[in-house]
Amino acid sequence: MTSSPTTPASLPVTVAAPRERGWARIIFALLLALAVPLVAILRLLVPIEQTMVLIAPAMAVCALLGWMSGGRLWLAVIWLGLAFWILSTSMPGAGPFDALARGWGTVLAASFGVVSAVAPRRPFLTRALSATAMAFAVALAVIVAMRVPPATVSRHVTDELARRFAAAESEWTARTASPEWKEMVQKYPTAATMVEQGEAQLRSVPPFTTRLFAALLAMESVAMLALAWSLYHRASRTRIGYPLKALSEFRFNDQLVWGFVLGVTLLVVPTLQEARGLGLNLAGFFGVLYALRGLGVLDWFLAPRGVVRLLFYIAIFLAWPVVSVFSLGLGLGDTWIDWRGRARPAA
C-alpha cells in the first residue's frame, strides 16, 4: 500500500496525469467491502460493517483535495453530497454504535484531509497511519471531554456485536429449517457437517473482536482509505499523491517496529498487566503490518505471474496460520536485513 514517486521530486505531486488503469481489482475490492453485512464471519470481524461510512467521506476528501489542486469541481460536489447524506442518515433500528461509527468516519476523513494538506508529498501509507492515529487521539479527547466512561463505549461495542451475532444465528436457524437445506443434508452429509461446524465456531468470534476492536478498527480504516485513494485516482486525472504500488514493494518506516515491540512488552511484562489490552491491540495491528511486509518480501522473491500468482494467493488463504507466522518473521527481519535490497537469486 505504500507509494513512491513516479515523477521527479522537483515536480508538484498534484499534477494532471493519465488515470490509473485497472478497474477489475478495485471493483472486486469495493464489492467485497460492500458485502461485509452479507457475510456472517465478516460482520463479526469488521468493526464498522457499513463500510460506505468510511469510504464515502474519504473519497469526498480526496475529491476536495483534487479540486483545490485544479481538479474538477463536480466530482468534489457529488462526493461531498453523497458523504453528507450517508453520514446524516441513520440505519433502521440502529443503536448508539451507529452514531459512533458515523462519527469515526467523519473524524477519520477529516484527519486524512488535514494530513494530506500539511504533508502533500508523503506517501499514502504514512498519511493513512497518521490520520488513523490522529482520529484515535481526537476520539480519546472527545471521550475525556464529555466524561464518557470507557465501560460505556465498551458496552456499545459488545451490544453491537451481540446484535450481529443474533442476526446471524437467526438466519442460520431459518436456513436449516428450509427444505433445500434438509435435501442437501441427505445428499451431502459431510459438507453439511463442515458448514455446521463453521457456524458453531462463530460463537468464538465476538469475544475475539471485542478484545482486538481498536486494532481491527485501525486496520479497517487504513484499508478503506486505500480503497478510496485508488478509486479517486482512477476517476480523476488530478493527482493528490503517488499511486499505490504492488505488494512486492510494500514497505514503510522501519521505526514502526517499536510499536510492535511496545505491544509485546506490555503483554509479557507481569507488572504491566493492566495495560495488556493496549499491548494486545498494538501487537495485533503492527503484527499485521509486518506480516503484509513479509508477504511483500515473499512476493518479490517468488515473483509469481499469471496463474501462478492466483495459486500463490490461494495458498496464502488456505494455509494462513502458517503463512502469517512465517511472513511476520520475514517482515520483522526485513527491518534490519532489507531482503529486497539484495539481488534476486537466479531462477
Image: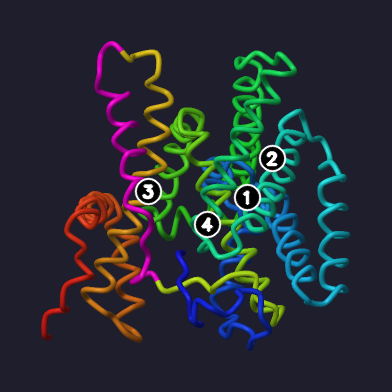
Whole-Å distance between the Cαs marked 3 and 4? 41 Å
Q: Which mark is residue 178?
A: 1
Q: Is residue 238 above or below residue 160?
A: below
Circle 4 crowding by C-alpha within 10 Å: few under 14, some 14–19, many from 20: few
x, y percentage for residue 310?
A: 36, 77
**Residue type, label 1:** Ser
Kindly identify the residue that appears in the image at 42 percent across and 45 percent down. 198
**Residue type, label 4:** Glu
Which marked residue is nearer to the observer: mark 3 or mark 4?
Answer: 3
- Number of on-image labels: 4
Q: Are marks 2 and 3 in contact (CB under 8 Å)?
A: no
Residue receiving disc 2: 104
Residue receiving disc 3: 288
Which marked residue is nearer to the observer: mark 1 or mark 2?
Answer: 2
Whole-Å distance between the Cαs marked 4 and 2? 45 Å
Read off the magenta span.
Answer: 247-271
First in residue order: circle 1 vs circle 3 = 1
Whole-Å distance between the Cαs marked 2 and 3? 22 Å
Q: Quadrant of the C terminus?
A: bottom left
